[in-house]
């Protein structure tokens, strides 16, 4: 798939979701894996827009790319917002507490990391790079090609 470059605004979230949905279909992910990946990407993209750009009074783009491999689908978000490594964000320690005792926020990063098989962050030059990896289903015997007996 060709990468998608969109403005770092909330209006771009639908375009990002649609792109990830198309990548999930191309990779033949099951509905559950596709949903979890879309949620993960959406959470991180929303944080990039709200905190990396808006709250920092910056503007910039988000580039989304999809890479389908034999065993996995990788989605990469790149942005020029302020550096932020989601892996350094503390894991919520009150997930079992009633909602009225928990503060607002903090779950998005947790859901993004938990919603993928592998999540990586890199800071390369002036870019934040968030990498989401989800395993693809194993091919069924009827979909593999080979000599028939």
Image: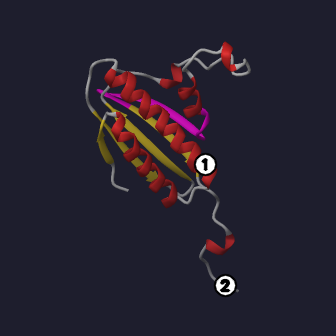
Residue 112 falls in image quadrant? top right
Q: Nearer the viewer, residue 27 or 42?
A: 42
Q: Nearer the viewer, residue 101 or 43?
A: 101
Q: Over which residues does the magenta segment extend?
A: 114-128
The answer to whether residue 109 is above or below residue 63 is above
Left or right: 29 in relation to 129: right
The answer to whether residue 103 is above or below residue 145 is above
Residue 78 falls in image quadrant? top left
Q: Position of residue 84 (x, y in %)?
A: 42, 22
Report the quarter where the C terminus lies.
bottom right
At 61% from the left and 20% from the top, the residue drawn is 91
Instruction: Assess disc 2: are there few (<14), some (14-19) or many (≥20) residues with their C-alpha within 10 Å of its C-alpha.
Output: few
Q: Which residue is mark 1?
A: 33
Q: CA distance from mark 1 to mark 2?
A: 32 Å
Q: Position of residue 62 (x, y in %)?
A: 33, 37
At 49% from the left and 24% from the top, the residue drawn is 86
Q: Residue furthest front?
A: 100
Q: Which residue is mark 2?
A: 148
Left or right: 121 in relation to 125: right
């Amino acid at each position: 798939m060709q990468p998608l470059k969109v403005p770092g605004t909330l209006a771009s979230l639908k375009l990002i979701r649609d792109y990830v949905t198309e990548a999930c279909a191309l990779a033949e992910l099951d509905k559950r894996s596709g949903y979890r990946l879309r949620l993960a990407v959406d959470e991180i993209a929303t944080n990039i827009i709200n905190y990396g750009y808006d709250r920092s009074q910056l503007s910039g783009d988000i580039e989304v790319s999809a890479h389908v491999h034999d065993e996995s689908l990788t989605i990469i978000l790149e942005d020029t917002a302020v550096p932020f490594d989601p892996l350094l964000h503390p894991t919520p320690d009150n997930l079992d507490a009633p909602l009225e005792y928990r503060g607002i926020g903090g779950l998005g990063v947790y859901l993004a990391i938990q919603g993928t098989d592998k999540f990586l962050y890199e800071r390369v030059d002036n870019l934040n790079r968030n990498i989401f990896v989800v395993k693809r289903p194993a091919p069924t015997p009827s979909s593999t090609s080979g000599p028939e007996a």
